[in-house]
Amino acid sequence: MSEAKAIESIFKRERISDALALRAVLETQKTAKGFGDPRVRAETYLRQAMVADAANPFPRIELATLLRYSKRDAEALALLEGARSRLNPVDSHTVVDVTIALMGLQALADADLPADPDPNEDTASLFSAAHIAMRRGDFARATDILRIGKDRLPPDFFEYLVNDPALRKFRTRTELNEFYP
């Protein structure tokens, strides 16, 4: 249903960058054989969306997330920096700030992680503190921190942030089941 609406919007040239970005997300969800690599198709749609509407930051953010799963962090970071300059709403800045903070932590060796950051400073600090707790194997603390975020943030916003690749890689931990059903 969503894919049909996205294709219809593309043909009608309505919100083309959003429609292409939606198709990209839908492509990444396809797992059936015979479709080829859905990440390649998703990347193609997101790059088309970026060309179709250079001012729209969201295809850049989605492509950065996709690239991170492929360990193309330098390219992802450049896209996020480009997206940051195109953002207006506060929530969008927060998504990019959280993502950049988590990417910075991912680049650190475990021994180089910051001491115990204050999760109450801002949203980026909250998700950073949860990530650090997960990396240290303190999943009880990570769960407590994520519960704070879940209480503070709108549900869709929290769900988007908790599914960042830096956090999502720990989704199989039973302590985190409430965040990754």
Image: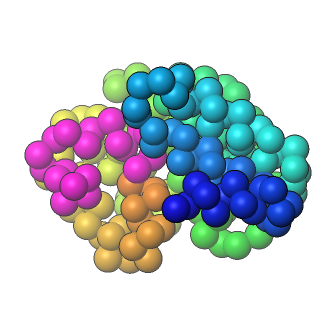
Q: Is residue 134 magenta?
A: no
Quarter of the C terminus within the rendering: bottom left
Q: Is residue 172 magenta?
A: yes
* Residue drawn at point x = 83 percent, y = 63 percent: 12
**Residue 89 image position (x, y, % from top left):** 70, 73
Q: Is residue 138 left or right of residue 149?
A: left
**Residue 46 in view of the camera:** yes
**Residue 168 image position (x, y, % from top left):** 35, 42
Q: Nearer the viewer, residue 74 or 159?
A: 159
The number of callouts visible is 0
Q: Is residue 91 left or right of residue 111?
A: right
* Residue drawn at point x = 52 percent, y = 62 percent: 1
Q: Quadrant of residue 87?
A: bottom right
In this picture the colour scheme is rainbow
Residues drawn in magenta: 163-181
95 lies above or below 153: above
Q: Is residue 46 left or right of residue 54?
A: left
* Residue drawn at point x = 39 percent, y = 73 percent: 155
Q: Nearer the viewer, residue 63 or 124?
A: 63
Question: Magenta stretch: dominant SS?
Answer: loop
* Residue drawn at point x = 41 percent, y = 65 percent: 158
**Residue 121 in view of the camera:** no
Q: Nearer the viewer, residue 10 or 42?
A: 10
Q: Nearer the viewer, residue 5 or 157?
A: 5
30 lies above or below 20: above
**Residue 52 image position (x, y, % from top left):** 87, 50
**Residue 70 image position (x, y, % from top left):** 53, 24
